[in-house]
Amino acid sequence: LAPCSRGLRLSGVGKARGARRKVATMSYAYPFGKVYETAPVHNSNHEATVIMLHGLGDTGEGWSFTGQQLQIPGVKWLYPTAPTRPISCNMGMAMPGWFDIKDLPLDATRIESAEEVSKEDMDKHIGEEGVKDSVKYCLELVKKEIEVAGIPPEKIILGGFSQGGHVAARAALECDVKLAGCVVLSSWVGSFFGGNGANSALPFFVGHGDADPMVPVALGQKSNAFLSKLGHDVTFRTYRGIGHSCSMEELDDMKDFLVQRLQGSGGPKLAFEEASQLSVGKLKKYLVEAGVDVTGCLEKSDLLEKLKGLY
């Protein structure tokens, strides 16, 4: 749908298990679409929820492979679908979008020389009213997980790709309950945020391809600087040669972030079979974070013996 970039789609994408989830919503300018869902893997108990928002022109189904791909026990995944609305950069034709984007690629000329991404900069590119509606909708999904599914807010993570990441970040910063974290992929965060929520010192994973032609990596760098300045705990990664998409390396890094955040808040841990397949470095880190003394463990076989003690 040139010139607009679609969200990530990979071959062999898994189908979501759930049908449409009905969410009691307030009045919006455009109706939101289907919410896809995948249950926790390996028939594990539902202990945490990740809400993942797609990019422009995509749907929740486009990211519905993620739960099966990452294989984190105890985590239910929700993949909402944005409203179908006229998109200015698509010659005004309708497509799924969390808000209107006036032009693509985003102009990095001023962004690269400014300390932060300002509201004035962003107003040239995006429709603020659509952003506000999508943030409210995202927070409704969080509220439903807490009140209906019984999931504590500290076991809920918001995430998104491209404009979905923008909405997820704003929702996380404005949320009035403390969340486990936020994932922002190929997106942007800036000084136009109110930041009036309960999530001070919120852990963020910010990932960006260094060859992104639609949302320049300068925006990812500015997002990292802005969030860090506010006191948030940011894990920032860039990926060589990656454009406006998500690589397997980035998904692997995102998984590490999710597991760390959900474990740290009393959430699920890896199944033994999966933990035993980690590299030596990651297995050692996993054991240390679980409080296991790995002193003297020189070989992976030594670490595996320690791992058995956790199960």
Image (spheres, helix red, strand yellow):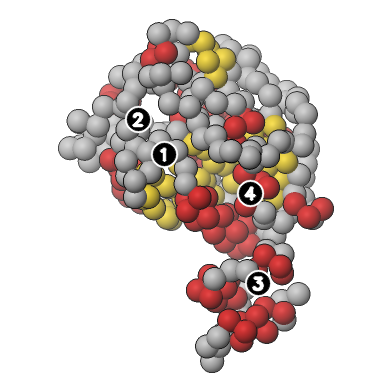
Which residue does the image show at 75% across and 52% down from the upper left? 41
Write down the quadrant of residue 20 in the picture. top right
Q: Is residue 35 visible?
A: yes
Residues at discs 1 and 2 in contact (Cβ within 8 Å): yes
Q: Which residue is mark 1?
A: 186
Q: Give the farthest residue toward the top.
A: 92
Write down the quadrant of residue 143 in the picture. top right
User: In the image, which is nearer the foreground, mark 4 or mark 1?
Assistant: 4
In the image, is 44 to the left or to the right of 221?
A: right
Q: Amino acid at mark 4?
A: Gln
The answer to whether residue 290 is above or below residue 183 is: below
Q: Which residue is mark 3?
A: 276
- Ranked by sequence position, the earlier of labels 3 and 2 is 2
Q: Residues within 10 Å of mark 4 (few under 14, many from 20)?
A: some
Expressed as whole percent of the image width and height from the top left, the position of residue 211 reads 32, 41
- Ranked by sequence position, the earlier of labels 4 and 2 is 4
Q: Is residue 127 visible?
A: no
Q: Which circle marks residue 49 in the picture?
A: none
Numbered disc 1: secondary structure: loop
